[in-house]
Each structure stands twice: as C-alpha cells, then as structure tokens.
Image (cartoon, grey):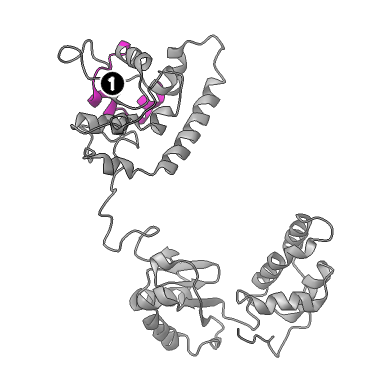
C-alpha cells in the first residue's frame, strides 16, 4: 500500500459549477437520510473532472461539507483510491497499464515512448499538455497493451501508433478511441477464424444467399450465442406486439402478419411425393407443420432461406412472434437441408404440441 499525499501548492478555494452542483445534489438525493455519504466517490470524481483531472484539498473539503462528513473521512477516500489524482496533471493525463497481460504484450515499449515524448513519470510537461503514470490493471486485458487518457481507453497500442496518438493530441487533431487496430472485444489479432456467421439465426443467411455457408454439424449450431438470440427475439416480439396493438381486434392472422412482415413464397406442391418431415425441426409439431404446408412450405431449404421479414410474418401468422428465433428454426432447417440433424434429433424427450 503506497503513501499518497496532497500536493504542497493548493488553490485558495473550490466551488462546483452550477451544472456540477446540480449533479452533486442529484447524487446525494439518491440515498436515504443518514446514508448520503455513499455519494462521496461520485462527488469527488466530478470535482476532479472540474479541476482538470486532479483533486485539490479545497474540493475535498467542499465535498465533505456537502455530505455533512468530517474532512478526514472524505480525505481517507480520496487518498485510498488511485483513481483520484492528488496533484496537478497534464491536460492529457496518460495512465499506462503495466500489469502482466499488458507487460507481456509490449507495455515496456510504451513506457519508453512516454519517457521520450512526455518525460519523467508523474511530471507535467512545461506546456501543461501531458503527464503520465503507470497503473495497475484497467480491465482491458483482451486488447493489451493499452492506456487510459482522461476518460477514454486506447487499446492495441504499438510504439508507433502510440507515439502518433500523443502527437495528434498535442496538435489538437481528432483521435480514435478504443482499439487502434479495429479489433472488437477479444477478437483474435489475426481476425476471426470461427463463428464468422450465425448461419440462419440472423434471418438473412440461407441457401443461395451470398456469403452464406451451411451449418456442418451440431457443434456449430450449439455455438450460437443463445443470450444474444434471446435478447433479439424479445426486442422483436415487443416491436411486433406494439404494431399488432394498433390493429382492429377482429384482424385475421394474415392481416396481422402482413402488418409486420412479408409472406414467404410457397410452392404449389412439394417436390417429390410428400416433401420433408418438418417435424424434425424442434418447435414444429403436427399443427404447425400442417399450417406451414397450407402456406406452401414443404421443405427444409425453404425455411432455411427465410429473410428477417419472412420470419416476422410466419411467426406472427402462427401466433408466436419471436419463437422461430428462440428455437432456431432457420438454423435447424439449414442443417437438415445439408444432411445434418435438428435439435429434436439430438434426443429431445418432450414432443412438440404445435
């Protein structure tokens, strides 16, 4: 645990701007009587932002006064958390992560850039533009090495792009926050090598669609992000139901479906004798299979090729918007059309009633 002291030279006083005063009062009001001290970190952070990203003693005293707390209690918070800078920093204060993942990915080279461009650690440049300090993990390990400059993260840094970033900041030129190489989250450095398409789940992939590739087996289907599918299904269902609420109460199933999507093209008759066994798709029972056949849907590849608008139409027509996505009909159908299996073939024990 390090010893952190306030700067020797302090301003004469501190008052929140009207905007920040209103923010502080709003934060305090979130807590019940006797618990308003819980707002201390939010108020100190806003005071630090107002003071040029450092926290002078008069600001600490003002926060203590607003919270009806002894100055020492607020001072304890300010000196404990390293997010609070207790001495002046540059207009662009660089916090450079030196923890293991960043260190292994090149943080040491970034420190040399800081020393070369900015100077010694914890010192402000003569023009007041920069200062820097090494800090512990900032939680962006997947895009290491990285730095935080004021409120923003800059990730996937190299000595070259980091030096350019500092040069652009010094010149007042626009800079790109986040990954400096375009990576998203924890994508591999060389680009995606798997799950490059959620075949069928996005409502646009399917046989004959440019860029689509058949699902080869159960493993790829199982890799679909169920949480994302569920979230999108919930949002789409809410959107559809909001539209349906505007229709007359006696609207037919087809009228409701036409209001939210596009009817898929059907066939006048199945190819071959009877068509595919659509009940191999988990979620399709005898009733739904019959209704789909009445729409001219007899084959797996027809379902695999549904667009987003067609999914909306069929789901609404069958009176369960969102279910087609949740049960992954399109993905199952694509797998079955390619000679694979559906979720029902994996051993589902509960028969589909619809």
**The magenta stretch spans residue 26:** no
Residue 305 makes an appearance in the image: no
Which range of residues does the magenta coloring cover?
Answer: 294-313
Q: Is residue 156 left or right of residue 320?
A: left
Residue tagged 1: 278
Q: Is residue 23 left or right of residue 177?
A: right
Q: Nearer the viewer, residue 66 or 296?
A: 296
Name the quadrant containing residue 33. Answer: bottom right
Q: Position of residue 60 (x, y in %)?
A: 75, 76
Q: Position of residue 163 (x, y in %)?
A: 39, 78
Q: Position of residue 169 (x, y in %)?
A: 47, 74
Q: Secondary structure at mark 1?
A: helix
Q: Quadrant of the C terminus?
A: top left
* Residue that appears at 38% across and 66% down: 180
Q: Nearer the viewer, residue 113 or 143?
A: 143
* Residue that appears at 27% across and 39% down: 218
Give the answer, above or below, for where 275 lies relative to 201.
Answer: above
Q: Quadrant of the N terminus?
A: bottom right
**The magenta stretch spans residue 303:** yes
């Amino acid at each position: 645990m390090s010893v952190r002291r306030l700067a020797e030279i302090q301003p004469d006083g501190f008052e929140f701007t009207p905007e920040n005063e209103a923010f502080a009062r709003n934060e305090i009001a979130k807590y019940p009587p006797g618990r308003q001290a819980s707002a201390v970190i939010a108020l100190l952070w806003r005071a630090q932002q107002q003071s040029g990203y450092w926290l002078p003693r008069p600001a600490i005293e003002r926060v203590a006064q607003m919270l009806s707390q002894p100055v020492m209690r607020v001072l304890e918070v300010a000196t404990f958390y390293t997010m609070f800078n207790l001495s002046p920093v540059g207009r662009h204060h660089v916090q450079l992560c030196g923890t293991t993942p960043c260190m292994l990915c090149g943080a040491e080279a970034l420190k040399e850039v800081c020393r070369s461009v900015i100077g010694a650690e914890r010192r402000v440049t003569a023009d007041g533009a920069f200062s820097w300090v090494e800090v512990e993990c900032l939680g962006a390990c997947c895009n290491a090495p990285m730095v935080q400059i004021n409120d923003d993260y800059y990730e996937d840094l190299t000595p070259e792009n980091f030096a350019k970033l500092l040069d652009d900041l010094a010149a007042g030129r626009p800079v790109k926050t986040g990954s400096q190489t375009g990576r998203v989250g924890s994508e591999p450095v060389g680009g995606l090598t798997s799950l490059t398409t959620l075949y069928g789940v996005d409502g646009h992939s399917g046989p004959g669609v440019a860029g689509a590739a058949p699902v080869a087996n159960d493993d790829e289907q199982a890799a679909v992000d169920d949480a994302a599918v569920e979230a999108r299904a919930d949002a789409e269902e809410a959107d559809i139901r909001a539209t349906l609420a505007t229709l007359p109460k006696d609207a037919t199933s087809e009228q409701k479906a036409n209001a939210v999507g596009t009817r898929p093209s059907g066939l006048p008759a199945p190819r071959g004798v009877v068509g595919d066994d659509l009940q191999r798709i988990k979620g399709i029972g005898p009733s739904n299979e019959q209704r789909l056949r009445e729409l001219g849907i007899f084959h797996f590849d027809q379902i695999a090729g549904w667009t987003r608008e067609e999914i909306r139409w069929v789901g609404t027509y069958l009176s369960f918007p969102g279910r087609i996505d949740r049960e992954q009909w399109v993905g199952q159908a694509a797998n079955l059309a390619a000679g694979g299996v559906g979720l029902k073939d994996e051993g589902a024990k509960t028969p589909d009633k619809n």
